DNA sequence: ATGGATTTGTCGTTTATCCAACACATACAA
DNA sequence: TTGTATGTGTTGGATAAACGACAAATCCAT
């Protein structure tokens, strides 16, 4: 999915860095996390950090990874862009919200939201391509933008207000999306 | 406690190997575990295994480490060789028995027993030294041998027959040991 | 016992990580 | 402001791990 580098040393180091970042971000806000913190926590040398360009690059890779882990790609492969598929994606987003305590990173909510929306956009775009090859490519891209914003926004709404499970929360809206309002 | 090498690469690799061995030994018997199995499980290159001389060397280091983890060294430092201390050591042995499924390694029970007794001997010897400096050194060594065999044997007895907690099991014997029969 | 398959121990080479050190940037208190 | 401390980005040399390869040892079915 991500890199072509299969040297186990690289794989291990990248994982150590990402795991340490996730661990640290459950303890303090993003603005208080330094690269030194991360490498110290990971028990690696600071000079080895530069698998990632900087801390924003790391944030991006981590968030994408965490979202990706919450998605069962088999479900997306086996389905068209149907109800089951949409619900699964929505659940992945809400799972992501829970597994990373995103609400605590004051001032970076927008950055986090953008990264996740970008990933969602890619996912929706792929699904749309598979679903309907006749349509104009630009139309697919635009639809993916709309869907990613819509689903992500709904997940924020769920987090703010709702005490019902994500599936139950989003289900009423799915027909509107799939068949039109 | 063990070695002086603090290079994080070495520490990580050793841990990967030992953890993989522990993982594997919960799935199959010692005689069926190969070095190749271990390095594959650990995602390291086979040539890197030779932090350990062979698989018996690894077994020894792992068992010692697992026993060591089950011991709260602070308790031993704070106490003479009294009841609390003896009970704690006995619990450490029984915890060890549980955490490593030693009963499954048919044909190697004696090897495992020897390794653990050796460790216990070292522990008892240190405690005896601290307790009474007047005594002849050889006497301490011999006493440590007796105690290590006695406690380990009792742990096997507990594992075979007993359904009561280790502490309860061993307590009646402690006065006999400390004050003489 | 024979032969094929697997594991083991060990190499030489390449590559990633470690480590100390450096200049520079940022922050923050005197 | 100036100084002090801490984080950042980067370097060069040392070292551990990866990798492929090899012969020898071990295992196992026939």
Image: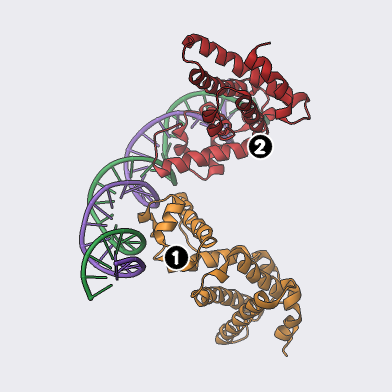
Chain colours: A red, B orange, C green, D purple
Q: Chain of mark 2?
A: A
Closest to the observer, B119 or B39: B39
Query: Dividing the picture into quarters, in which one does residue B37 lie?
Result: bottom left
Q: Can you give x and y, in whole percent of width and height, for residue B118 in the image?
A: 53, 76
- Relative to residue D26, is residue B140 drawn left or right? right
Q: Does any portion of residue A141 appear in the rendered image?
A: yes
Closest to the observer, A23 or D9: A23
Labels 1, 2: one chain: no
Report which residue position mark 2 lands on: A26
Category of crowding for the residue at label 2, using alpha-carbon neighbours closer than 10 angstroms: few (below 14), some (14–19), many (at least 20): some
Indicate the secondary structure of the residue bearing disc 2. Answer: loop
Q: Residue furthest bottom?
A: B181
Query: Dividing the picture into quarters, in which one does residue A110 lie?
Result: top right
Q: Give the vertical position of A103 relative to B146 (above or below).
A: above
Q: Give the vertical position of B146 relative to B47 (above or below).
A: below
Q: Can you give x and y, in whole percent of width and height, for residue B166 in the image?
A: 71, 72
Q: Give the vertical position of A43 relative to A88 (above or below).
A: below
Residue under the point 49% across and 68% down: B60
Q: Chain of mark 1?
A: B
| Mark seen at residue B32 | 1
Q: Can you give x and y, in whole percent of width and height, for residue B46 in the image?
A: 37, 55
Closest to the observer, A5 or A120: A120
Category of crowding for the residue at label 1, using alpha-carbon neighbours closer than 10 angstroms: few (below 14), some (14–19), many (at least 20): few
Q: Does any portion of residue A55 appear in the rendered image?
A: no
């Amino acid at each position: 999915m991500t890199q072509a580098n299969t040297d186990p040393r690289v794989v291990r180091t990248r994982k150590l860095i990402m795991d340490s970042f996730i661990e640290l971000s459950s303890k303090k806000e993003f603005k208080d996390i330094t690269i030194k913190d991360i490498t110290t926590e990971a028990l690696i040398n600071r000079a080895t950090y530069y698998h990632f360009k900087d801390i924003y690059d790391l944030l991006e890779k981590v968030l994408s990874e965490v979202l990706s882990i919450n998605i069962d790609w088999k479900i997306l492969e086996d389905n068209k862009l149907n109800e089951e598929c949409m619900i699964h994606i929505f659940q992945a987003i809400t799972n992501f919200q829970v597994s990373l305590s995103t609400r605590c990173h004051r001032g970076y909510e927008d950055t986090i939201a953008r990264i996740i929306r970008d990933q969602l956009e890619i996912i929706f775009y792929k699904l749309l391509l598979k679903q309907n090859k006749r349509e104009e490519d630009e139309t697919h891209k635009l639809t993916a933008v709309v869907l990613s914003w819509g689903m992500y926004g709904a997940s924020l709404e769920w987090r703010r207000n709702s005490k019902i499970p994500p599936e139950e929360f989003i289900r009423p809206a799915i027909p509107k999306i799939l068949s039109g309002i």
